[in-house]
Amino acid sequence: MARWLPRSTDLTRFCQKLNRVKTLEDDMMETSFNRCLSTIDLTLLGIGGMVGSGLYVLTGTVAKEIAGPAVIVSFIIAGFASLLAALCYAEFGARVPKTGSAYMFTYVSVGEIWAFLIGWNVLLEYMIGGAAVARAWSGYLDSIFNHKIKNFTETHVGTWQVPFLAHYPDFLAAAILLVATAFISFGAKVSSWLNHVFSAISMGVILFILIMGFVLAQPKNWSAQEGGFAPFGLSGIMAGTATCFYAFVGFDVIAASSEEARNPQRAVPKAIAFSLGLATGAYILVSMVLTLMVPWHTLDPDSALADAFYRRGYSWAGFLVAAGSICAMNTVLLSNLFSLPRIVYAMAEDGLFFQVFSRVHPRTQVPVIGIVVFGLLMALLALVFDLEALVQFLSIGTLLAYTFVAASIIVLRFQQQKVEPRAPAAGCRPSPEPHEGSSASELKEYESFSDKLQLVDRDKSKEHREPGQLKAAFEPYLEFLSDFYPGEVVTVAVVTLMVSAICLCSILAFGNTHLHLPTWSYSLLLVLFSLGFLLSLFLIWAHEQQHGTQTFQIPLVPLSPALSIILNIYLMLKLSYMTWLRFAIWLLLGLLVYFGYGIWHSKENLRELRPQSVSARYVVFPSSSLEERVQAVQPSSQPDPGPPDTDTNDCKR
């Protein structure tokens, strides 16, 4: 029976495979794509991804049903919460200017299987999101023509009464997706130009809404006679914040486009900051003029802006609002179709997804196969499926990606960067694998003496400490942490922080409602998990992090990413149980793809199978003196040339 059980060494090797990180090349600016996008191009892509139909629909819905005029405060809080996630994306996009967005960021810092699952969820998120926007675009245009398109389809094609399928096939939604797919296939410059046109029209309409809205504003609509500024109180504001948070989903298109930016180190952080700031300002100002034009409780949730102008005697303005809404939806469609194939390309390029999607067209310099295949899949979803029940799935995929990117920022900031080693010089011999069974406490074996010299001499030089090492000020009090390798304690602390955040948010979300905890146990659990969260945060902060990089860095690490993590987890736990069930099923399908294909074709797996190019190996022998004795070791595959040279000075040369 015991012989069928896996050995501990096999389990360890298997876990190492799952958690291996991506090796970055020395020159990360080298790419198969065309680096043609400027800061303005990236900014407009981000605005197009965020300022969509939500501006014309979400503002009225939240104002009437959730928060009242205090929807303004909801958008301010949601904008700040989104800023925490956006800053994490900005740092990664500048440091790792490769396509793939959250997938790539997780791969270079956390591990392979986590990166694959993030990418797998983002794929479905973009497909459902694009198809849902296409159906909304179709329905909006159809309503302008008194639903003639819908009536014609139902009369001549028929209707369906099948679960999960739409009531009738939406040919218009599928057609707009196919047209958008064709334009995206022409290259990044064409896509960017088309996005410029629609974004310019949309921003022009928003400017018109703001000017006319403030002219028609009536401050009495915020008075106590109409219910006041915050009729639903603080709970309404926070509930509105949770809904408004999803209005800012879309800035990750900038990070996904970093491999096509001319100067990603500067352009990506600026574009994310500009686009998020403009989008937040647009949502706040439009909410303000909307609730000042007409009383909030009389708004039409389906077409709040057009209805507000109509009731103030400017029915012609409804056509401008309709034009702006359609153009805004077009920019969201372009954003989804632009990002999705590039994330698929990144996964295929790393060997985790089918290799056919890693092909880049030599002329247009875009992944045409991925664009066409996933454009067709998106059109099929919009044609026949009922997407209303699946729209909430978008939230959990986005929030999960935000959570892992925030955790990846902490891990990456406290570890040394892993880059692709240069080819060895002529005459260098490969080194053998480390001997199994040797005690780590007796011999510490390194492949590169120059890379590990500071570990040998760390007792002599306390001033210069590498990322992941304990700060000198805390060493007298936390000396037992000095025995770990740099970054190990931080990694464990990040895991503990996320577990504490999950438990803390679960108590906050379900303690009084579903779990019915007594007051004393509710308070005790809150205190315990809060202490675990704060202790993990302190242990991370007590270690050295990377400083002096030439690219953008998010301030207040690890506090800022930790706040983003706990906020995202709380919002995920507020989603319905059916969303979590669908999420679990999709994850199981992803694991089948990963273990059936990705883990075997991963480039990191192929790199591990190649012989390592190491010119010399060194063993550090502990001694009683402060300076440890370093001895060069010849590869065992070569004949022994004689007794090894034990002169420390020769090794230091």
Image (cartoon, rainbow, N blue to C red):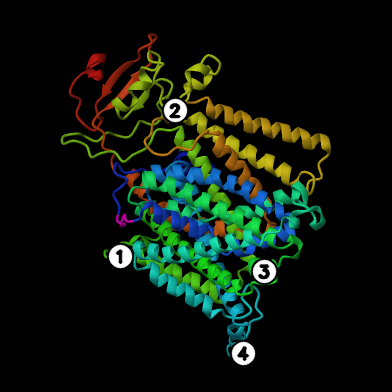
Q: Are marks 2 and 1 in contact (CB under 8 Å)?
A: no
Between circles 3 and 4, the one closer to the viewer is 3
Residue 528 within the magenta-colored segment of the rendering = no
| Corner quadrant of residue 293 | bottom right
Residue 451, above or below 126: above
Instruction: Using the rendered image of the protein, determine whether residue 25 is visible from the camera's viewpoint.
Output: yes
Q: As shown in the figure, which amino acid type bears the numbered disc 2?
A: Pro
Which numbered circle lies on residue 155? 4
Identify the mark nearer the N-term, 2 or 1. 1
Mark 4, secondary structure of its residue: helix
Which numbered circle lies on residue 486? 2
Expressed as whole percent of the image width and height from the top left, the position of residue 633 reads 27, 24
Q: Are marks 3 and 4 in contact (CB under 8 Å)?
A: no
Q: Main secondary structure of the magenta part?
A: loop
Q: Which one is nearer the viewer's eye here, 165 or 1? A: 165
Disc 1 target residue? 364
| Corner quadrant of residue 374 | bottom left
Quarter of the image with the N terminus is: top right
Identify the mark nearer the N-term, 2 or 4. 4
Mark 2, secondary structure of its residue: loop
Q: CA distance from mark 1 to mark 3?
A: 40 Å
What's the magenta region?
Answer: 32-36
Disc 3 target residue? 302
Expressed as whole percent of the image width and height from the top left, the position of residue 117 reads 51, 52
Q: CA distance from mark 4 to mark 1?
A: 42 Å
Q: CA distance from mark 2 to mark 1?
A: 44 Å
Q: How dense is the environment of label 4, judged by Cα within 10 Å: few (below 14), some, or many (20 and up)?
A: few
